[in-house]
Amino acid sequence: MQKIMKRAIFPGTFDPFTIGHYSIVERGLALFDEIIIGIGVNQLKKTLFDEEKRLDIIRQAFINEPRVKVTTYNCLTIDFAKSVDAQFILRGLRTVSDFEYERTIGDTNRILSGIETVILFTESDYAHISSTVARDLISYGKDISAFLPPNVKL
Ligand code: ADP
């Protein structure tokens, strides 16, 4: 009998991709055969890092991990999941406010498409890591290498 490949997307803005995101994907590899990181691109949403740079950071992080792929998308997340044959959406959770947000979109996505969201709690060492804080530090000229995944250079 042929085994069905378990595939998840990990969608986000990733402006920039941090060590917190990296840890969620690494742990997700114990649950899924393949994870496709989807960078949501939306012309109306201004980001500090452009599409190419956001792709480059994630490619550097997973250069030695063939089970992780990365791409951009500009449609509804569930349509992106269907387009790559993913049965699951992977997300990470840090705080109570993350919980409310994730529950709303997770429920909506399941009701609309049947696609389940799998949520992993952040490792406590990374609970304070956020793309927003990383961008703030950059705007004050600070180094953010401690926020980035291993082996990533900006
Ligand atoms: P979005 O704009 O879709 O929230 P983000 O790039 O901010 O995109 O985050 C993508 C996912 O990663 C979300 O599920 C978010 O909760 C999770 N995440 C962000 N930072 C961390 C972290 N430090 N630890 C665990 N999960 C995180």
Image (cartoon, rainbow, N blue to C red):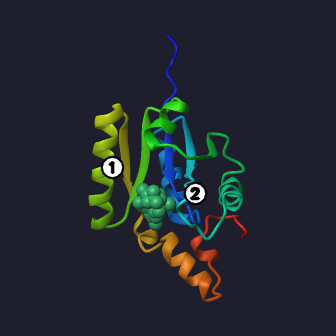
- Is residue 91 found left or right of 98 in the rendered image? right
Residue 3's label in the rendered image is: none
- Is residue 50 found left or right of 89 in the rendered image? right
**Real-space Cα separation, disc 1 to disc 2, in angstroms:** 21 Å
Name above or below for residue 116 compared with residue 47: above
Can you tell me whether the CB of the residue at mark 2 lies under 8 Å from the nearest atom of ligand 1? no
Q: Name the residue under label 1.
A: 105
Q: Which residue lies furthest to the top in this view?
A: 1
Front one among 80 and 33: 80
Find residue 153 and report its image quarter.
Answer: bottom right
Residue 43's label in the rendered image is: 2
In the rendering, at what x and y percent does residue 109 appear? 34, 41
Q: How many residues crowd mark 2 within 10 Å: few (<14), some (14–19), many (20+)? A: few
In the rendering, at what x and y percent does residue 140 appear? 60, 89
Amino acid on which disc 2 is placed: Gln
Amino acid on which disc 1 is placed: Ile
Q: Which of marks 1 and 2 is nearer the N terminus?
A: 2
In the rendering, at what x and y percent does residue 119 appear? 36, 50
Q: Do labels 1 and 2 touch, CB within 8 Å? A: no
| Residue pictured at 53% horizontal, 59% vertical | 13
Q: How many residues crowd mark 1 within 10 Å: few (<14), some (14–19), many (20+)? A: few
| Residue pictured at 48% horizontal, 72% vertical | 129
| Residue pictured at 49% horizontal, 74% vertical | 132
